[in-house]
């Protein structure tokens, strides 16, 4: 893939907004129902794939690969923009603690020029619902970037310079426009220059997600899938500045199932109030009708049930997680390849969730 085209897809790679423990023993025929979706993921071009399912209180994980051992619930993948929902949960915890409000204006340390609308400032709610008016990326992100690792070079000094030359595309609160920059700034607003540690302390650790982290420990490295793009191995993404957007987060199917279990039954979670706040409807795009929680997208399944979801991707990995509280069903899929062809793997998650919840 040519450098210019590769950098041009960096905006989309960390997630797009479009909707069409170890696993327990499979019950209710889950193995037979999940297997066709694994086969379809491999047929779509994934070197390997893993699905995790919650249904009827049971958890099931299954993986498959083209060559070599199949991934399982402890195989490490990059999570991509599903990590935005962790940042949104950290925001919700701060709201519950009374340290911020959803309508608190975005504030950063001196030296950072915060873009502002003509009618009002950007609020934390705007950032968490992709309605801030900010563009997808800062104006200077791709200047000098490694085409295979486009965030790795970016520093806080670069962010300060980039914000000064980044105008708003829309007035805050007026329209949905997916923004990695917006969620990166949300992370910095909550914990300036300590975003990764904050996400671990406020979200991953309390929910028992030991492998959901931006720090690849040696034991995780030995379990990590190799990312691919166009059939070639590619490096993992690194990001020290905009990581609140999920750009450099790792996780496993087991960890994401614990996370989804907390989404399905918040009352059993230590983060109950924060989780409920993230799932609540906070914004509707007037042009498309797309509905947003905090971080989460709110859609509709074929029979009218609400699906709450997010996808994610880096240049080596793609993931999607979705759940339906009405049927107490959740699905996560992780594959070790990226595709810029209309996110072909997401539809498998929605179709499986629709089938299992009906």
Image: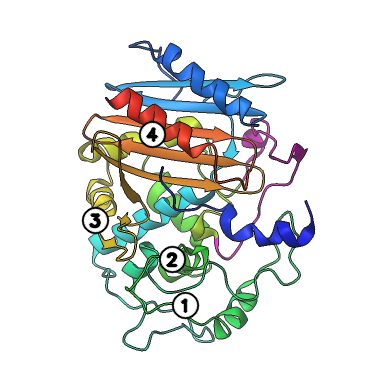
- Label 4 packing within 10 angstroms: few (<14), some (14-19), many (20+): some
Q: CA distance from mark 3 to mark 2?
A: 17 Å
Q: Residue 162 at what x, y percent from top left? A: 60, 79
Residue labelled with disc 1: 169
- Tag 4's secondary structure? helix
Give the overall secondary structure of the magenta segment: loop
The residue that label 2 is drawn on is 177
**Image coords of residue 329 (percent x, y):** 30, 29
Task: Of the two numbered discs 4 and 2 on the same chain, state the one appearing first in sequence.
Answer: 2
Instruction: Answer whether residue 239 is visible to the viewer in this image.
Output: no
Left or right of residue 21, residue 150 in this image: right
Please indicate whether residue 7 sits to the left or right of residue 301 in the image: right
Q: Which mark sits nearer the N-terminus, 3 or 4?
A: 4
State the mark number for residue 258.
4
The residue under label 3 is: 281
Is residue 205 one of those drawn in magenta? no
| Magenta stretch in the rendered image | 216-242
Numbered disc total: 4
């Amino acid at each position: 893939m040519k450098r210019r085209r590769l950098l041009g897809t960096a905006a989309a790679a960390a997630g797009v907004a479009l909707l069409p423990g170890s696993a327990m023993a499979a019950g209710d025929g889950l193995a037979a129902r999940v297997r066709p979706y694994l086969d379809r993921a491999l047929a779509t071009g994934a070197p390997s794939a893993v699905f995790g399912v919650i249904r009827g209180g049971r958890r099931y994980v299954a993986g498959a690969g083209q060559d070599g051992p199949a991934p399982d619930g402890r195989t490490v993948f990059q999570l991509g923009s599903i990590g935005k929902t962790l940042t949104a949960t950290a925001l919700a915890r701060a709201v519950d603690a009374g340290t911020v409000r959803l309508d608190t204006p975005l504030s950063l340390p001196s030296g950072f020029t915060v873009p502002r609308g003509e009618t009002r400032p950007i609020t934390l709610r705007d950032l968490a619902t992709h309605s801030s008016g900010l563009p997808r990326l800062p104006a200077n992100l791709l200047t000098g970037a490694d085409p295979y690792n486009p965030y790795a070079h970016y520093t806080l000094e670069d962010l300060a310079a980039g914000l000064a030359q980044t105008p708003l595309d829309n007035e805050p609160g007026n329209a949905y426009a997916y923004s990695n920059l917006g969620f990166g700034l949300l992370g910095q607003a909550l914990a300036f220059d300590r975003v990764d540690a904050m996400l671990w302390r406020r979200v991953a650790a309390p929910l028992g997600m030991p492998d959901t982290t931006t720090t690849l420990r040696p034991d995780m490295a030995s379990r990590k899938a190799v990312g691919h793009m166009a059939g070639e191995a590619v490096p993992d993404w690194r990001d020290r500045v905009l990581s609140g957007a999920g750009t450099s987060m790792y996780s496993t199917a087991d960890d994401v199932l614990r996370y989804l279990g907390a989404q399905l039954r918040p009352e059993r979670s230590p983060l109950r109030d924060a989780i409920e706040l993230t799932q609540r409807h906070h914004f509707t795009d007037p042009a498309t009708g797309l509905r947003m929680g905090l971080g989460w997208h709110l859609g509709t399944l074929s029979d009218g049930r609400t699906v709450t979801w997010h996808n994610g991707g880096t240049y080596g990995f793609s993931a999607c997680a979705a759940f339906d509280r009405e049927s107490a069903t959740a699905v996560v899929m992780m594959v070790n390849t990226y595709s810029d062809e209309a996110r072909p793997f997401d539809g498998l998650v929605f179709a499986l969730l629709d089938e299992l919840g009906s």
